[in-house]
Image: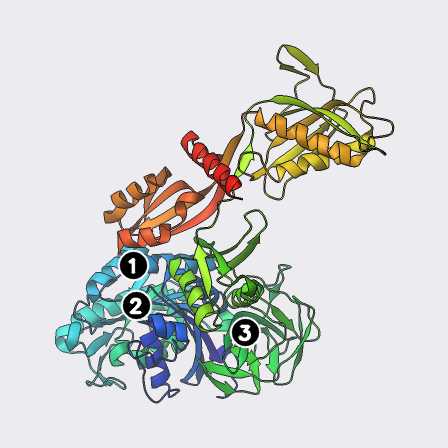
């Protein structure tokens, strides 16, 4: 493959829901461009895209696959992405480093929730979108219905370029209203006959052609003037208008194909070459300092690594986009994230696991290299003269979590090494060694996502692991004021230990004033705050520590020890051993001994006084609450809402959005354990959801009683 310049390169993400036909389309693109000699199939497990063992095992795409083809003296860099929402990280990273999204729809199913969700990402990233209605050869294919759904969902910006004369097993002809020609294929597909449009179709074709001319002219003032003067535009002018419409997202062209029969694929590549924006026309990327980076081949070199895989017999493969400059074989680059030097000892363009060596790649291009020492996904590599750093990919929040441990405890360290390596490959796997829960928690996009991780560890790394329900990070707090005092006294022959602490605790809310007088058991306690310190807690909330000691009953040098003792109890609340939060502690009195008082004595006195006061202050358990948004077809609304209410959800609202319903709720994390599986079961896989931490809220009384009993039983067992 030759070296291409910026304006000769098109970077395209192939996106779409599960079963839309992306992998089959990739095979047809590779075959028609001569990269492969024979098309594989998903059923036979021999496609270029799905080449990892886990993909062959489960029969669906897990990873994004990069492949490059040459067509019409241009280089098309495609990234074929997984369709399942569980593997959305691949689609997100692909859309961030490409310039155009090719959205594939299955003509049998039309606009699905996967289409809606992925289109939302293109909106966020402001990427051009081309719709491809595929699988027109299938029995239940319905082009007109799919087109109508697209227009209902995305409005008049959806503009037809092509339409089939018939669908189903007899599909072999389509009218192209940009070219104003009929494309006709033989049974084996491939190169079409290009014919005049039959007279019976001419009126419809001319009407669609005129609509396309108008839509193209709307995106450029000069073209609009020509259109008014001449009443039409040339094909070249229309292509310019379509390209500008794509750039501004003022137009979403619709083309059609049967990738399985290799019909429409050559015309698709021609359309992408002639009508999609080049790299130099796209908005500029910004580095982490907000500086725009020109895709200039003569500028200092910067590479952004957007994907990492590990293959047997090869090791780590790093896939990158050349953000600026030119990368050459043998270049020495600096890893801006790690400060380490890396040499580009091999440079490839790729087609799945097939790699072709190339001497250099220019700005805007996509390539791969192998065996970099210390490079992970998201890292930036720079040549001399620049210190760029890029961090523009924002991955979706996790939706499914499990505790994980090695079946053999001796393999725990090895398991963590594997998990960290896999996290470097797929940043949507989140690994947490929780000190609080005393568990390793792995979070991902769904049950299949984690099921895939388990399969890979057990089959590729030969390490048996177990998944189980993770503990919930509860919190403890208080609901009223309480007072306590505690004397720590110990005599053992020599120097003894003595410390006495009197304190008051109360619930704390941001900005609340402190009373001057507290009343407990008929007694008044006047408080004069001499010093107030706020300590934000790493687990959320605050501890406010007030020194109200008068008369020197406790020396100031012992206050840090008292605080240390209190903090120790905040780290292990008395109800369930969970972290405590949002407490104000006022130390107002105490006693000390001129010889026996020391820091240990006051630490223990402070800790025990705090524990006693906490138990008398109406202690309550808090649970994490998440904001959950569910996108679903309207016919499932009742069942989904009923399921959520059974999970103690508070329904916050609902509204329609582009053909789908959106349901908003607040749900306890405890109840979200198997939600992705349940939602898929209820809706037949046609719904999706997102979840994001919202707040900690008091658990209901019955739940608190159950948690207390469980904790007591656990303590007795230990």
Q: Nearer the viewer, residue 393 or 361?
A: 393
Residue 426 horizontal/vertical position (percent): 50, 65
Q: Quadrant of residue 217?
A: bottom left
Do we see residue 474 in this rendering? Answer: no
Residue under pointer 2:
20
Side of 665 where 524 appears, left or right:
right
* Disc with the residue nearer the chain's start (3 vs 1): 1
The residue tagged with tag 2: helix, strand or loop? loop
User: Label 3 to label 1, Cα distance in Å?
Assistant: 31 Å
Residue sticking out furthest to the left = 200
The residue tagged with tag 3: helix, strand or loop? strand
Number of other residues with Cα within 10 Å of mark 3, as a class: few under 14, some 14 to 19, many 20 or more: many
Residue 555 horizontal/vertical position (percent): 83, 28
User: Label 2 to label 3, Cα distance in Å?
Assistant: 27 Å
Q: Is residue 647 above or below residue 425?
A: above
Q: Nearer the viewer, residue 474 or 387?
A: 474
Residue 251 horizontal/vertical position (percent): 36, 63
- Callouts 2 and 1 close, C-beta under 8 Å: yes
* Disc with the residue nearer the chain's start (2 vs 3): 2
Residue under pointer 3:
320
Residue under pointer 1:
112
Q: Is residue 383 above or below residue 496?
A: below
* Disc with the residue nearer the chain's start (2 vs 1): 2
């Amino acid at each position: 493959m030759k070296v291409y310049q910026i304006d000769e390169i098109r970077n395209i993400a192939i996106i779409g829901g599960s079963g839309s036909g992306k992998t089959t389309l990739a095979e047809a693109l590779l075959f028609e461009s001569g990269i492969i000699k024979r098309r594989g199939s998903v059923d036979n497990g021999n496609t270029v895209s799905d080449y990892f063992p886990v993909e062959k095992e489960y029969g669906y795409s897990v990873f994004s696959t990069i492949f490059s083809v040459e067509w019409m003296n241009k280089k098309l860099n495609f990234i074929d992405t997984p369709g399942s929402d569980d593997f959305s990280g691949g689609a997100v990273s692909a859309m961030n480093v490409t310039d155009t999204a090719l959205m594939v729809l299955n003509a049998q199913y039309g606009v699905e929730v996967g289409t809606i969700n992925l289109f939302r990402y293109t909106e966020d990233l402001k990427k051009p979108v081309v719709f491809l209605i595929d699988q027109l050869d299938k029995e239940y294919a319905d082009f007109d219905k799919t087109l109508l759904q697209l227009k209902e969902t995305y409005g008049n910006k959806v503009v037809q370029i092509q339409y089939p004369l018939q669908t189903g097993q007899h599909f072999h002809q389509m009218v192209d209203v940009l070219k104003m020609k009929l494309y006709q294929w033989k049974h084996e597909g491939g190169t079409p006959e290009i014919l005049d449009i039959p007279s019976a179709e001419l009126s419809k074709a001319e009407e669609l052609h005129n609509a396309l001319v108008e839509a193209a002219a709307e995106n450029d003032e000069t073209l609009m003037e020509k259109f008014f003067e001449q009443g039409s535009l040339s094909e070249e002018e229309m292509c310019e208008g379509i390209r500008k419409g794509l750039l501004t997202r003022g137009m979403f062209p619709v083309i059609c194909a049967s990738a399985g029969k290799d019909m429409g694929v050559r015309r698709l590549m021609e359309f992408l070459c002639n009508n999609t924006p080049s790299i130099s026309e796209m908005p500029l990327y910004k580095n982490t300092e907000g500086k725009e980076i020109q895709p200039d081949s003569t500028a200092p070199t910067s590479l952004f690594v957007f994907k990492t895989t590990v293959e047997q017999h090869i090791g780590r493969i790093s896939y990158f986009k050349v953000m600026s400059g030119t990368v050459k074989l043998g270049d020495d680059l600096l890893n801006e994230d790690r400060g380490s030097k890396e040499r580009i000892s091999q440079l490839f363009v790729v087609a799945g696991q097939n790699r072709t060596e190339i001497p250099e790649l220019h700005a805007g291009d996509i390539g791969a290299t192998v065996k970099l020492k210390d490079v992970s996904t998201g890292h930036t590599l720079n040549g001399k003269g620049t210190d760029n750093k890029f961090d523009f990919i924002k991955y979706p929040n996790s939706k499914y979590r499990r505790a994980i441990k090695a079946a053999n405890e001796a393999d725990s360290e090895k398991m963590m090494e594997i998990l960290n390596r896999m996290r470097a490959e797929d940043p949507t796997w989140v690994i947490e060694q929780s000190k609080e829960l005393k568990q390793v928690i792995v979070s991902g996009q769904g049950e299949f996502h984690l099921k895939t991780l388990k399969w890979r560890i057990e089959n590729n790394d030969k390490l048996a692991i177990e998944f189980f329900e993770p503990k919930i990070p509860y919190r403890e707090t208080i609901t009223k004021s309480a007072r306590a005092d505690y004397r720590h006294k110990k005599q053992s022959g020599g120097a003894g230990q003595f410390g006495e602490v009197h304190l008051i605790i109360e619930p704390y809310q941001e900005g609340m004033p402190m009373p001057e007088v507290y009343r407990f058991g008929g007694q008044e306690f006047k408080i004069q705050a001499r010093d107030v310190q706020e300590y934000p807690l790493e687990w959320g909330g605050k501890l406010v520590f007030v020194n109200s000691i008068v008369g020197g009953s406790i020396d100031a040098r012992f206050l840090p020890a008292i605080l240390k003792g209190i903090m120790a109890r905040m780290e292990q609340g008395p109800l369930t051993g969970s972290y405590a939060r949002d407490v104000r502690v006022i130390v107002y009195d105490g006693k000390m001994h001129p010889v026996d008082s020391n820091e240990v004595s006051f630490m223990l006195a402070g800790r025990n006084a705090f524990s006693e006061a906490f138990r008398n202050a109406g202690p309550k358990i808090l649970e994490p609450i998440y904001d959950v948004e569910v996108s679903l077809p309207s016919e499932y609304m009742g069942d989904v809402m009923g399921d959520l209410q059974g999970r103690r959800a508070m329904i916050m609202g609902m509204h329609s959005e582009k053909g789908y319903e959106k349901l908003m709720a607040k749900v306890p994390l405890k109840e979200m354990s198997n939600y992705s599986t349940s939602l898929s079961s209820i809706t037949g896989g046609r719904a999706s959801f997102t979840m994001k931490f919202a707040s900690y809220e008091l658990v209901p009384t019955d739940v608190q009683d159950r948690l207390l009993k469980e904790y007591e039983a656990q303590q007795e067992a230990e």
